[in-house]
Image (cartoon, coloured by chain):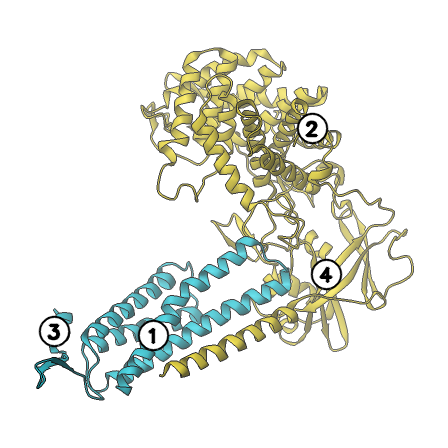
Chain colours: A yellow, B cyan
Amino acid sequence: MTPRALARLLGAWLALLVVSAIAVARWAALAPVPPSERLVVATEWRNGEKSSRRVRPPEPGDDAPDGTAVLEVGVAEAPLLARSPFFELGLVPGLDGVRASLGGRTAVVTVDDLLREQGYDRASGFASGQLTMGADRELVLARLGEQLGVSARDVAQRATLRRVRFERRVPRAKPAPRVTAEVLDPAAVRAAVKGAGEYLARGQDDRGRYRYLVNALENKTIAGYNLPRHAGATFFMAQAAGLLGDARLRWAVLMAAGYLRKEAMGACGPYTCVIDDGEANAGSAALAVIAFTELVRRQLDDSFVHEVRLLAAFLRSLQRPDGELMHEYDRAKGRPIDVQRLYFSGEAALALARAHRVTGDPADLEASKRLLARLVGTGWSFFGSRYYWGEEHWTCQAMAELWDRAPNEDALTFCLRWHAYQQKLQYDATDSPMDAEGAFGFGSFVSPRLTPASSRGEAGAATLAALRAARPSDPAVGPLQREIDRAVAFVMRHQFTPGPTHLFADPIAVQGGVPGSSVDWTVRMDYPQHAGSMMVRWLELRERAPNPP
Amino acid sequence: MWYSRAVAEEPAEKERSGADGAVERERPVAGAAPGARGRLVFAVLAALVALLVALGVFAGLPARWAPVDVPAAIVMLSEIAAMVTLLRWSPRSGLVVRATSGLLLAVGLTLIALLVWTGAWLYGVYGPIGKGGALLYFFVAALALPYLVVVPAARLLWIGAKKRA
């Protein structure tokens, strides 16, 4: 082949590619539907169930309905391919529904239908199934088929499908102002903390256990329990009870802490540890210490100093000469197992730092210092460590906790780098069609999760407190404050305060809960925990510096 | 060694002394085997492409999917054939090199087109697809470009030049 022939071939290919790519993008993009031609889906909901539905053309008054039906108005449409994976990825989570036409009949699956059946972000999973993406194709086709009187397969093969962007209009609803970083209000944040605390307290049983995992739509508790998360939630409850001076939350946190003390603590050789399903590890003990120390610091119950001493001694016994912890304990053989698990070392560093504050035992301080030095030093030292990060939210809280007694400049630098990296991953308003501003992630196809925003905000506020103490005019102060503000605003926008109550079987039961994402409406007890802890730290920062940069 | 034999069998450019005593290089005649160095370079590149496709698709991708696996296997086998042909030159080797290069170029251009069309479709559905998403597509395309487009294009030019010579 001659150079000229090759250049011609590649040039023609490039030109064709550019033109075809523009055509594909325009074909897939939503086109606004004129108001007079819009599809209006009027649905009556009773206890979260659809009781009636009418699909009709627009009527006067649809913009501010005063009936009993919730309106979903199709404001824009685009073609939708029935083939997988174009179907799954062709619907924007929480915004798009589907219209199918077949033989002169029309069927509609709206956004509320998909939210009610939890049909978004369900198609395929990765990262061990923890992250899922894509609408549930089988579910949508089945629902369309039921309305059209044909099988799901017929819908896929014969129907004309359209992606519809819906806007919801709830009768007599007052439009709430959008919570953004720019308008964050301490009173509203306090109310959000109270809501998260009340959600956890409302679900407690008479042993002091919270509801672990709740399907918020059905208000059903999903089986399972996790002691480290119980301890983490108890930490937040102590923060909230102390901050708000709320008697109900105080009662709830004492119940929860009492459960840990009475039913979860046991012997690990000569030490006392937390036993979860017969097993003992550093994470359970560390989070229990974090919770108990908060009870003492907030003057909710000083008697927990005793348990703090016992558990801190157990944690110290797990420390290796290089500062790292052995994370598990073989109770039968009475010795630690030298394995490392995600989060545990950061949690233990924070636990020991907090333990020292209430016990005054210098051994706790020394152990925490050594562990933190290991975490930010040799524990995360390899070529490329500036570009790849673990989950460091506990590590950075440990750094901040130690700052007034054992400042570690390397740890502060480490946390500032971690946050600078996170700031690059934080969505701005134009990064996603979803309401994702302030969340953290890599792309738009998965609805951003709330808890990573909460944990980063929590650690960000701790890091900012240390940075202000060390160098108040550091150039990182402003970006860090903005990162936290945006994370708080993002989480508050998605907290059930009260959320779309027409879709909930029992809206009061889940009020204040923090779901997994804008379309995953399960509430695990650590979701409100991290969200609430972030907000408490944000309020404490605001108290110290009422006019941040 | 197979590759040293291939190099040894190469009818190298011959040197002869002209009437004025200057050393002249004798160019290979049309249809003769291309230079040993060139063949060795392109054989190594063919092996590298085969290896990268094998690692990228059969070790890197978490699931088996015929629309990806079958073309990848064909490219892999084709590049191995190109490598062997380049090292053990025969009168038909030029044809094989052109065919395998054309195949690899076609696969490369198709892959990049599919990535661009997918990106365009996602842009249409989601609007701005996020800095991370856009960067990911750019890097996947950029990683494919040298091995699946530049290598076969260069090989086609090289073998074309040899034919014209």
Amino acid type indicated by mark 4: Arg
Q: Name which quarter of the figure residue A297 lies in.
A: top right
- Indicate which label's residue lies in the foreground, 3 or 4: 3
Q: Name which quarter of the figure residue A97 lies in.
A: bottom right
Q: Name which quarter of the figure residue A323 lies in.
A: top left
Dot 1: chain letter = B
- Indicate which label's residue lies in the foreground, 4 or 1: 1
Residue found at x 88% / y 52%: A64
How far apart in space, not on screen, are marks 1 and 2 (Cα)? 62 Å
Q: Which residue is mark 3?
A: B5
Location of the C terminus of chain A by quadrant is top right
Q: Give the SS element for disc 2.
A: loop
Q: Which residue is mark 1?
A: B154
Q: Provide residue B29's location: percent of width, then percent of height.
A: 19, 88
In the rendered structure, find residue A139 and report the number of the disc placed on it: none
Residue found at x 50% / y 70%: B114
Location of the N terminus of chain A by quadrant is bottom left
Amino acid type indicated by mark 3: Arg
